[in-house]
Amino acid sequence: MSVLVYVENWDGKFKKLSFELVSFASETAKMMNSSVIVLSIGKVEDSELKKLGDYGAGRVLALENELLATLDSQAYSNAIAEIVLKTGSKVVILSNNNTGKALAPRLSVRLKAGVGSGVSKLPLSTDPFVVYKRTYSGNAFARVEIRSPVKILTLAQNTFHLTETPGNAVIEKIELPEEITGSTKVLDTKKQSGKILLTDADIVVSGGRGMKSPDNWGPLLELADALGGATACSRPVSDEGWRPHEEHTGQTGKIIAPNLYLAVGISGATQHLAGVSSSKYIVAINTDKDAPIFEAAQYGIVGDAMKVLPKLVDALKKR
Ligand SMILES: Cc1cc2nc3c(=O)[nH]c(=O)nc-3n(C[C@H](O)[C@H](O)[C@H](O)COP(=O)(O)OP(=O)(O)OC[C@H]3O[C@@H](n4cnc5c(N)ncnc54)[C@H](O)[C@@H]3O)c2cc1C
């Protein structure tokens, strides 16, 4: 009857979302009088695995295998499904990011399990099992009852608080279940290095089509650097190839909730806001005083980004 949560790491360090997932799983397990099993895939040191115990993990299953060295959603979902069956877990929790969105439907088929995607709160009840989730790009909420014996939940990022509960997780190294294969083989990967992970960043400086051209990004990057923040962009900007796809935030991109989100030359379309509206403070810079972004923002500057950004950078450098 356990709750199994799959956590993600970045070069051996758990992403912030992993601790959120374990906190959420731990509170869900309490509601079910059950326990939390955490599954970590990849090379992670014991000292890092132990940290999961601080958020309520009782057991941590650490799986390291060459076949799972890169994220192949078919191989991963085969492995996770086997582990769910072996542990007899009844609830499986993943992040509602690109990884979770790729794994949840595959797991759903393999485990004949209903999925509650993008849940943003603890289940409203566990018998019947009813979850509360965002829908229509966060413009509405839905209550969804999941009736299958195994339930899969993907947690909307940055919607659940971290709950530290001093504990001592038991770490078990496990082997890959037999006959786990994927149909693709990753030949090469290029990882970002030295950059702040967008989904973990406290400060994000983001540019939209109002930046006019990729050549104008210099001051925006300087501002992000001066603030120690990460950079992001709207979808048309990544579609145009002005900025890399992994910076795109919104309904079809990353969902983030930094303390400060600076939206520069971004109109504030609902699809964009779906990814950033949980930010603590939104500051907008836009030439159009009626742009919808100002309705979402706590602070706004009506002005030309090309003039405002260098002034902000200068002011920060002087401080
Ligand atoms: C199914 C679907 C999913 C989508 N998913 C996403 C998503 O995940 N993320 C996303 O971002 N979009 C998404 N979109 C697109 C979305 O609807 C908007 O088209 C997009 O967000 C607009 O991007 P933008 O604000 O950069 O550009 P625009 O809408 O063109 O806005 C540019 C803004 O810059 C301002 N501006 C112009 N010049 C300057 C200047 N010199 N200085 C300052 N401001 C200036 C303008 O006043 C304007 O407000 C999606 C659309 C669909 C249909």
Image (cartoon, rainbow, N blue to C red):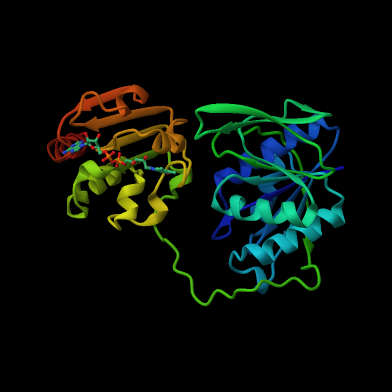
Q: Residue at 46%, 41% (x, y): give it.
A: 251
Task: Single out the residue that lies furthest toward the front.
Answer: 136
Task: Single out the residue that lies furthest toward the left.
Answer: 307
Picture layout, residue 14 above or below residue 204: below
Q: Which is more toward the observer, 308 or 296?
A: 296
Q: Residue at 69%, 51% (x, y): give it.
A: 6
Which quarter holds ligand 1?
Answer: top left
Residue 232 seen from this side: no
Quadrant where the C terminus sits is top left
Picture layout, residue 126 above or below residue 238: above
Q: Which is more toward the observer, 181 or 228?
A: 181
Is residue 163 toward the left or the right of residue 283 in the image? right
Provide residue 293's location: percent of width, then percent of height. Answer: 32, 29
Quadrant where the N terminus sits is top right
Which quadrant of the structure image shows residue 90? top right
Q: Which is more toward the observer, 44 or 161?
A: 161
Q: Residue at 74%, 63% (x, y): give it.
A: 79
Is residue 257 toward the left or the right of residue 90 in the image? left
Provide residue 313's location: percent of width, then percent of height. Answer: 19, 39
How many numbered marks are there?
A: 0
Which quadrant of the structure image shows residue 29? top right
Is residue 169 toward the left or the right of residue 285 in the image? right
Provide residue 229's location: percent of width, then percent of height. Answer: 35, 43
Residue 157 seen from this side: yes
Provide residue 237's location: percent of width, then percent of height. Answer: 30, 50
Is residue 62 toward the left or the right of residue 281 in the image? right
